[in-house]
Amino acid sequence: MALFAIGDLHLGFGMKKSMEKFGEVWKNHSQKLEKNWKKYITEEDTVLLLGDISWAIKLEEAKPDLDFIEALPGRKICISGNHDYWWSSVSKVQKAYPNITFLRNNSTTYEKVFICGTRGWVCPNDTFFTPQYQKIYHREVGRLKLSLEHAKNAGAKQIIVLLHFPPTNDKKEESEFTKLFRQYPISHVLYGHLHGEDFWKNSLLGNDNGIFYDLVSGDRLNFCPKKIQLDSVLSEY
């Protein structure tokens, strides 16, 4: 019963959209994903999907992509990304795909570990931050807090946080997200969104103040879901 994570699948079966213009790594990326997934993941495993799942605009357009994911082995837990426009209502999506867990303002569990998450947003003082982003940023911080409180109220002793966007700006400065992390028994923060070496090199990675950070964008992993090592359990909160 292993745990894996990957973000930014950018599937486009229903839209017939190719990602190959974004680099060689994206050539036939859905076939690479399927091959790697079936090689390493069994029905007993769990896979965390960190947003930008489908290019579809409407849920019915996303059906070929979600059907593809549903048919792959293992349990799937998802958060939304900035391109997941098809995810307008979590209840509607959850009803359509009851075998996939869609996180928003809530939490779920993997064995004794709680999984929380939200999309996140560009953090203040980032190169790409604009004043118009302030409201969205604070809304996403609030959504993460709701998710974390949901886990806390259920007795969580260890939490993994899923974000689509990085939890800091590109200068790796403290954010409202990182401040929030310190208030809960969080062992891992996983995120995606960033594509290409120029962005990966500015990522918050490894152990920082007792929390392990990792970037699991699909192209960074060459579309092979990454096994998450849960070798430290927080004993006190």
Image: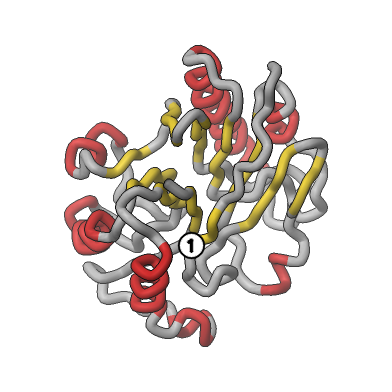
Q: Is residue 222 above or below residue 96?
A: below
* Camera-nearest residue between 233 and 16: 233
Lateral position of residue 158 relative to residue 76, left or right: right
* Residue 150 percent location from the top left of the image: 48, 19
Q: Secondary structure at mark 1?
A: loop
Please tell me in which quadrant of the rendered image residue 95 appears: top left
* Camera-nearest residue between 222 and 43: 43
Lateral position of residue 233 relative to residue 62, left or right: right
* Residue 128 percent location from the top left of the image: 68, 56
Q: Residue at x 64, y 48 (%)?
A: 122
Q: Residue at x 24, y 53 (%)?
A: 58
Q: Is residue 172 above or below residue 110?
A: below
* Residue 14 percent location from the top left of the image: 22, 68
Q: Is residue 20 above or below residue 62?
A: below
Please tell me in which quadrant of the rendered image residue 108 appears: top left
Q: Residue at x 44, y 31 (%)?
A: 109
Residue wearing tag 1: 225
Amino acid type of disc 1?
Answer: Pro
Examine the rendering and report whether any part of residue 60 can be seen: yes
Q: Residue at x 50, y 54 (%)?
A: 5
Q: Is residue 99 above or below residue 108?
A: below
Looking at the image, what colour scheme do you see?
secondary structure
